[in-house]
């Protein structure tokens, strides 16, 4: 619930703290005292579009801060987690909005910077504000559908429809994608076949380019390679006077050296290493010289093969791997032409089954919605006269069929109302009076109170055009809803004010020579005086004071009732 609202430099308000409690909270006061300003500040906090005009004259910026108790609210915790915002250990959520005179505005959640859109998302989960059309979720068909589904308990039916729609939509996308690829491949078939034939005929191998280059280099230098390798072989092992023979002749003096000085054994080992290494070089060069061929025909074949590789790379890719991948992709597209019809047929059969499931699921949801709409219509219509909407007022929840079933079913839900006997019910959006709209919402909330996740309801103008006995009935209904929700209402009626658990008086005051607005919690005699003022006449007369006491006594005592509140 909303436990505290702090307002600074907003319109007439310089500095104000409004502390609210569970149950029914009412704001009363003279016309023009600033009651609607407080509701306007709350609207701004909850994501309403900001205007620099709200900044109090002579100040640089206005700020609004709200403290909410969200302990146990898993939906709010999920929003915070998704946005990367740390929750408060005490279960409190602090929202703040600041509007600068130059038009810039900022927002925070639990001290972390955020956007007005995030405040709006959290605000919709925390507060339902009624009285001005731009805040009335009741006017939106999506909200009307959600209200009816909550009333009907359609969670399982709706989940089945969503899953069936998801499956059917996925299959449609698969079919569209495959069919588009098939058509594109068919248009490119001749070109694709040319690519496949040219690339596959080349029989390219990984690493072939480097192999061809190495072989071409050897063949083009074959005579030089034979001369070099033969000369090296002769120089090392070609005769007794060759290098190997000369090194072999060093064996005797090295042995004598080591015999006299065994410490030079390492020299003998170095000699042996050098001797055998030279021997290996001579033998290798001899074998290598025998393998070198002078083959102009093979060199010509390699040059032609290199030419082919160069042309394919110029057309299809920078490397052989890329060329091979182009051929593979072209072959896959050609295969698609042959296989697509079979695959499309299989997918279309699956789509038929999925659409049949969607139709069945949507039909089951429609059945529950139509039945629930009748029950909800009758229940709300029965409550309306108790809220001062007599004269044949009728509420209807209508199911409007859609051309085809979607993720939310096969119909839209529209709430309609007729406020005068003999007139057909019309959409709520055409109801002009904010007071009538608030009372219709109050009637619905009376019925749906235990199903609604939004914990705080704000009513403005709920008492427009009513009084006397109807005012008492409206007050009783608001108190009934307040058993499971926090209700915050602006009222001019003493009958409603007398039913409050928390009564707040809004009045103008002067501070430092400037007009401001202040809020005072009322109790005991102060509350009697305010209710007497609201009754009209002389608020200090014995008659007015007695009447005020009677109204307050008829209302269930706030202290006794608080123990029964489901918060």
Image: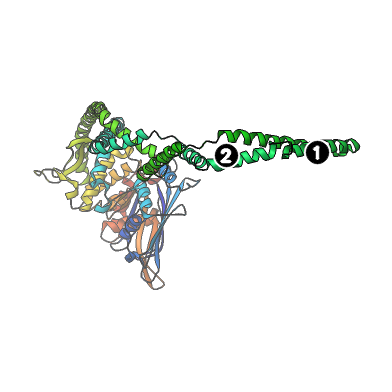
Q: Tag 2 or tag 1, which sits nearer the N-term?
A: 2
Q: Secondary structure at mark 2?
A: helix
Mark yes or no: residue 204 visible.
yes
The colour mode here is: rainbow
Whether the residues at callouts 1 and 2 have beta carbons within 8 Å, the answer is: no
Q: Nearer the viewer, residue 440 or 181?
A: 181
Q: Position of residue 46 (x, y in %)?
A: 35, 53
Q: Position of residue 36 (x, y in %)?
A: 30, 59
Q: Please rate how many residues cluster around mark 2, counting C-alpha atoms within 10 Å: few if below 14, some from 14 to 19, many from 20.
A: many
Q: How many marks?
A: 2
| Quadrant of the snapshot with the C terminus | top left
Q: Nearer the viewer, residue 453 or 24?
A: 453
Where is mark 2, residue-wise? 226
Q: Residue at x 26, y 31 (%)?
A: 337
Q: Please rate how many residues cluster around mark 1, counting C-alpha atoms within 10 Å: few if below 14, some from 14 to 19, many from 20.
A: few
In-image side of 395 versus 129 (left or right)? left
Residue occupying the far right of the picture: 260
Which is closer to the viewer, label 1 or label 2?
2
Q: Nearer the viewer, residue 117 or 425?
A: 117
Q: Position of residue 449 (x, y in %)?
A: 31, 39
Q: Nearer the viewer, residue 451 or 508?
A: 451
Where is mark 1, residue-wise? 250
- Find the distance from the CA under tag 1 to the CA under tag 2: 31 Å
Image position of 389 with respect to 178: above or below = below
Q: Position of residue 87 (x, y in %)?
A: 47, 46
Q: Secondary structure at mark 1?
A: loop
Residue occupying the far left of the picture: 422
Image position of 502 with respect to 185: above or below = below
Mark yes or no: residue 24 visible.
no
Image position of 194 with respect to 354: above or below = below
């Amino acid at each position: 619930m909303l436990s505290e609202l702090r307002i600074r430099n907003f319109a007439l308000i310089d500095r104000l703290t409004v502390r609210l409690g569970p149950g029914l909270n009412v704001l009363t006061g003279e016309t023009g005292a600033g009651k609607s300003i407080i509701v306007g500040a709350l609207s701004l906090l909850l994501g309403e579009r900001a205007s620099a005009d709200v900044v109090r004259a002579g100040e640089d910026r206005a700020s609004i801060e709200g403290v909410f108790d969200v302990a146990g609210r898993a939906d709010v915790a999920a929003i915070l987690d998704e946005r990367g915002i740390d929750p408060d250990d005490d279960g409190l959520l602090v929202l703040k909005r600041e509007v600068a005179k130059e038009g810039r505005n900022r927002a925070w959640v639990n001290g972390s910077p955020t956007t007005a859109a995030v405040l709006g998302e959290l605000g919709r989960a925390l507060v339902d504000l009624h009285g001005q059309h731009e805040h009335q979720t009741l006017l939106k068909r999506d909200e009307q559908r959600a209200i009816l589904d909550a009333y009907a308990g359609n969670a399982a039916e709706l989940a089945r429809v969503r899953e069936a729609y998801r499956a059917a939509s996925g299959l449609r996308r698969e079919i569209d994608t495959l069919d588009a690829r098939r058509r594109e491949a068919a248009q490119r078939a001749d070109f694709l076949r040319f690519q496949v034939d040219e690339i596959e005929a080349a029989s390219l191998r990984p690493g072939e380019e480097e192999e061809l280059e190495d072989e071409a280099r050897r063949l083009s230098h074959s005579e030089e390679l034979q001369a070099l390798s033969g000369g090296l072989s002769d120089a090392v092992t070609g005769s007794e006077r060759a290098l190997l023979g000369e090194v072999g002749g060093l064996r005797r003096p090295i042995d004598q050296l080591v015999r006299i000085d065994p410490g030079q054994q390492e020299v003998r080992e170095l000699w042996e290493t050098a001797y055998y290494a030279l021997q290996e070089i001579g033998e290798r060069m001899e074998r290598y010289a025998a393998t070198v061929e002078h083959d102009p025909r093979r060199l010509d074949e390699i040059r032609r093969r290199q030419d082919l590789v160069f042309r394919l790379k110029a057309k299809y890719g920078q490397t052989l791997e890329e060329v091979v991948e182009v051929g593979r992709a072209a072959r896959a597209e050609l295969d698609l032409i042959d296989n697509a019809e079979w695959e499309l047929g299989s997918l279309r059969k699956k789509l038929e089954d999925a659409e049949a499931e969607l139709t069945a699921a949507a039909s089951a949801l429609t059945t529950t919605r139509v039945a629930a709409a009748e029950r909800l219509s009758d229940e709300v219509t029965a409550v309306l006269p108790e809220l001062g909407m007599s004269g044949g007022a009728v509420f209807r929840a209508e199911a409007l069929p859609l051309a085809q079933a979607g993720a939310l079913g096969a119909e839209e839900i529209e709430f309609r109302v007729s406020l005068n006997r003999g007139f057909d019910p019309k959409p709520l959006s055409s109801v002009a009076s904010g007071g009538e709209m608030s009372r219709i919402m109050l009637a619905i909330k009376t019925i749906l109170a235990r199903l609604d996740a939004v914990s705080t309801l704000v009513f403005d103008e709920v008492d427009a055009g009513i009084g006397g006995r109807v005012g008492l009935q409206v007050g009783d209904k608001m108190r009934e809803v307040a058993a499971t929700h926090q209700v915050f209402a602006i009222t001019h009626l003493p009958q409603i004010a007398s039913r409050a658990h928390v009564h707040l008086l809004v009045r103008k005051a002067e501070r430092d020579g400037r007009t401001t607005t202040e809020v005072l919690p009322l109790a005991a005699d102060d509350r009697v005086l305010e209710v007497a003022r609201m009754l009209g006449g002389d608020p200090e007369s014995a008659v007015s004071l007695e009447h005020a006491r009677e109204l307050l006594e008829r209302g269930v005592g706030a202290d006794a009732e608080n123990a029964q509140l489901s918060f």
